[in-house]
Image: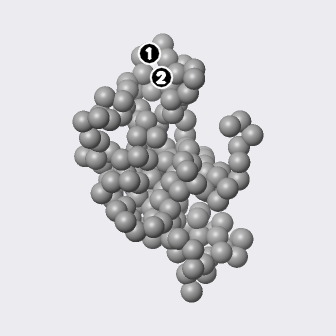
């Protein structure tokens, strides 16, 4: 019945099961709307710790702590979305099996741009992987936070299947 690459969902330690299930339900809803729910399987991948998979070559550029005067200041570390992608999608978590992946992060993520580090909520890389910041379980308790996560997943899911952003 399933004929296209499955989608596996992974979550950073600290992301709740409720957040993970909201991502699964959102993806199934979109697949049903476009009549692809019988062609693409959604699977649970498991929990991951970004630091465990960073190698010596990437650890220095893996995260940074924004200074208080940074326009996107928030306490805690901010992870490089591209390094998360390179370390998880090519390394031990996924191995040789072919599928698309969604990584739910409790910590903020950034991309390196010509203007420096840009803090973002989500990104789709190489039409294979979504890295999305869904914050920690404590910040997930309001209806507004759940709705924001719902729309973030739908937005990035569109990019996963080829919808382009006018800003890139």
Using the image as rendered, state which of residue 35 and residue 20 is in the foreground: 35
Image position of 23 with respect to 77: above or below: below
Label 1 Cα neighbours within 10 Å, binned few <14 / some 14-19 / many ≥20: few
Residue, disc 2: 73
Image position of 40 with respect to 151: above or below: below
Element marked by disc 2:
loop
Q: Pointer 1 and pointer 2: residues touching (CB < 8 Å)?
A: yes
In the displayed structure, does residue 50 sit left or right of residue 100?
left
Image position of 59 with respect to 135: above or below: above
Say whether residue 3 is visible: yes
Q: Residue at x 65, y 75 (%)?
A: 36
The spot of residue 91 in percent (x, y) is 33, 54
Q: Which residue of the protein is positioned furthest toward the top in this rendering?
A: 69
Q: Residue at x 29, y 35 (%)?
A: 57
- Label 1 and label 2: CA atoms lie apart by 6 Å
Q: Quadrant of the C terminus?
A: top right
Element marked by disc 1:
loop
Residue, disc 1: 68
């Amino acid at each position: 019945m399933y004929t296209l690459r499955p989608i596996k969902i992974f979550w950073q330690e600290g992301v709740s099961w409720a957040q993970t299930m909201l991502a699964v339900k959102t993806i199934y809803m979109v697949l049903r709307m476009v009549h692809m729910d019988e062609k693409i399987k959604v699977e649970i991948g498991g929990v991951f710790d970004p630091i465990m998979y960073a190698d010596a070559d990437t650890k220095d550029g893996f995260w940074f702590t924004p200074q208080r005067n940074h326009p996107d200041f928030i306490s805690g570390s901010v992870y490089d979305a591209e390094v998360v992608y390179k370390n998880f999608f090519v390394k031990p978590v996924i191995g040789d099996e072919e599928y698309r992946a969604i990584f739910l992060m409790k910590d903020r993520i950034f991309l390196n741009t010509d203007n420096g580090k840009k803090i973002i909520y989500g990104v789709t890389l190489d039409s294979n992987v979504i890295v999305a910041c869904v914050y920690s379980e404590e910040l997930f308790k309001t209806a507004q936070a759940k709705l924001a996560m719902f729309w973030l997943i739908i937005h990035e899911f569109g990019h996963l299947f080829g919808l382009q952003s006018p800003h890139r």
